[in-house]
Image: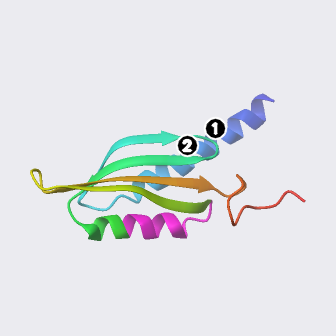
Amino acid sequence: VASSYSKSAEKSVKIFKDIVSFAPNGMTFTTVAFSSEGMQVEANVNSVIPLSVFISKLKSYPLIDTVSLDKIESKTSGAVITVGISTTFKGQGGANAISNN
């Protein structure tokens, strides 16, 4: 049991580090929530370009099944765009989930 938990934890840490490393210049995370089913991110971006880059990298990541842009809010006072993004991991019931059959 301990060895499978350790392997699972290592995999989770790798996924977390990979996803955070996808953030381009002009993007900062305000909240990152990670679970075995997926990840929810709130971030500030200075334009749609870094947002597009980040979403493209998420979509091409082999362990992510779905990516959803849940919120996009322009704050003109700070010249920043606040976004909420959620993902599901493959094998968690998404459209492209890996079947255990």
Is 78 situated left or right of 2 in this image? left
* Amino acid tagged 2: Val
Q: Position of residue 81 (x, y in %)?
A: 24, 57
The image quarter containing residue 10 is top right
Q: Quarter holding the N terminus?
A: top right
Whether residue 8 sits left or right of residue 85 in the image: it is: right
SS category of the residue bearing label 1: helix
In the image, the segment drawn in magenta is 53-63
**Residue 9: assigned label:** 1
**Residue 34 place in picture, x, y as percent:** 53, 41
Please tell me how crowded label 2 is: few (under 14), some (14-19), or many (20+) other residues with Cα within 10 Å.
few
Can you say whether 12 is above or below 72 in the image?
above
Category of crowding for the residue at label 1, using alpha-carbon neighbours closer than 10 angstroms: few (below 14), some (14–19), many (at least 20): few
Which residue matches tag 2?
A: 13
Specify the quadrant of the image occupied by residue 24. bottom left
Disc assigned to residue 23: none
Name the image quarter holding the C terminus.
bottom right
